[in-house]
Amino acid sequence: MFTPLIRFTLLILCTIVGIIAALSGWHYLIIVAALLSLGLLWGYYNVGTVYLALHKMRKGRYEEANQILDLTRKPEKLRKTRRAYYYYIKAYVAREKDDFNTAKDFFNLALKDGLKAEHDQAVALLALADIALIQGDKKEARTYLDRMRGLKVQPQLMPQIRQMQEYLGDIFV
C-alpha cells in the first residue's frame, strides 16, 4: 500500500544500507537490503497503487482514489486480479462523474479480468444495470441482474438490488 514516491524513497534507503553493508562487510545486511529492494520493485510492477486506491474508494474519496491510480503508469502490466480492481475503481470514478460510457467499459473490463470478491462482482453488475437503465435499455439491465443470481452479497447491498428489481418488474433473490 505504498505510493510510488514512498517506494522510491525506500528503494534509495535500501540501496544506501546495501552500500554501507558492503563497505562494512555485513553480508547478511546486503542480502536483506537486496531482498527488500526486490520486494518493493515486485510490488510496484505487480500490485501498483491499487490497494491504496481501493481503500480510498471504499471511504467515498473517489477523486483521491483516481489520483492514486494515475500513479500506476502501466496498468496492463498489473497482475490480472489487481488489474480488475484497477478498472473497477476507474469505473466508479467515471460513474461519479456521470461518464456512463467510460464507466460501462471499465466495469466490463473489471468483470472480464476477474474481480475476486463476489460482492464486488455484484456491485459491478448492479452498477452496469443502473447504467443500462439510465441509457434506456431495460433488457440489458435485466441481463446484468440475471448474472447476479447466486453471487454472495453483503446485506447492505440488498435494498439496492430489490429497488432495481422492482423498477424492472423482476422478482428474484
Image: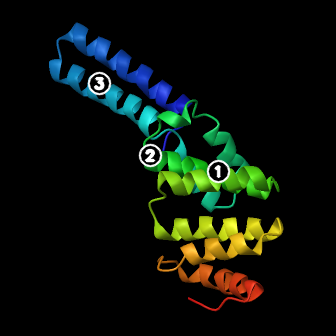
3 vs 2, front mark: 2
Along the line of sight, the residue nearer the viewer: 88 or 167: 167
Badge 3 amino acid? Ala
Report the amino acid beneath label 2.
Answer: Lys
Task: Tell me which amino acid carries mark 1.
Answer: Phe
Secondary element under disc 3, as helix, strand or loop, is: helix
Instruction: Compute the Cα span from label 3 to label 2.
Output: 28 Å
Q: In the image, 112: left or right of 41?
A: right
Circle 2 SS class: helix
Q: Disc 1 designates what residue? A: 106
Which residue is the site of mark 3? 33
Q: Residue at x 17, y 23 (%)?
A: 28
Q: Is residue 149 left or right of residue 64?
A: left
Query: Is residue 130 among the parts visible in the rendering?
Result: yes
| Residue 52 against residue 35 in the figure, above or below | below
The residue that disc 2 covers is 80
For the residue carrying disc 2, how many other residues have a C-alpha within 10 Å: few (<14), some (14-19), or many (20+)? some
Is 6 rendered above or below residue 87? above
**Residue 149 % position (x, y):** 52, 79
In percent of width and height, residue 91 lies at: 67, 53
